[in-house]
Amino acid sequence: MPLDDPLLQGFRRFQQQYFSADNPIYASLCQGQHPVTLVIACCDSRVHPPALMGSQPGEMFVVRNVANLVPPHSPDNQHASVAAALEFAVLNLKVGRIIVMGHSGCGGIQALLKRSTPADSALTHWLSIAELKHVN
Ligand SMILES: [Zn+2]
């Protein structure tokens, strides 16, 4: 990565802003995190929960995935990322609030509605969580 890469420059600004002697945020966060809110958001690059809600580092525990979906409970799924995050946030971090943050123009939901992804793709399988299921 070139030294003038915008991501590297941004990381340097972050370090200067949050690790300076006059900013105690990370000095405190090094001792542990105590977020009060869990946010389940889409991984869409336009959706940035902490920026949208003016949250500082340490205030928000965030789970992001395509179309901000929460899969149904499945005790046999040993790789359930969202369930693990929910469990950790509620039982360990003891968050008091959970927000599922949808957004307009979600490409994941559009792909689901248009059925525009290959039938055997990981994305199609993931988006099937949001399909209406009829239970008799
Ligand atoms: Zn989305």
Image (cartoon, grey):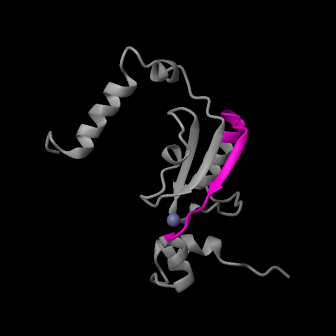
As drawn, 52 above or below 26: below
Q: Is residue 10 magenta?
A: no
Vertical placement of residue 55 versus 85, above or below: above
The x, y position of residue 71, in whole percent, is 65, 63
**Residue at left 47%, top 18%?**
24
Q: Is residue 6 left or right of residue 100?
A: left
Q: At x 60% / y 55%, what residue is drawn?
A: 80
User: How many marks can you see?
Assistant: 0
Image quadrant occupied by the N terminus: top left
Q: Nearer the viewer, residue 4 or 126?
A: 4
In the image, taking residue 14 as reference, residue 72 lies left or right, namely right
Q: Write down the region rendered in magenta.
A: 88-106
| Of the pair 54 and 77, the residue shown nearer to us | 54
Name the side, left or right, on which 18 lies relative to 25. left
The picture places residue 33, in percent across and down from the top left corner, at 57, 28
Q: Is residue 101 magenta?
A: yes
Query: Which sits in the foreground, 42 or 51?
Result: 51
Dividing the image into 4 quarters, which one contains the C terminus? Answer: bottom right
Q: Residue at x 71, y 60 (%)?
A: 73
- Name the spot of residue 12 as percent of width and height, x first: 27, 32
Quadrant in the rendering for residue 77: bottom right
Q: Residue at x 48, y 72 (%)?
A: 107
Q: Residue furthest top?
A: 21
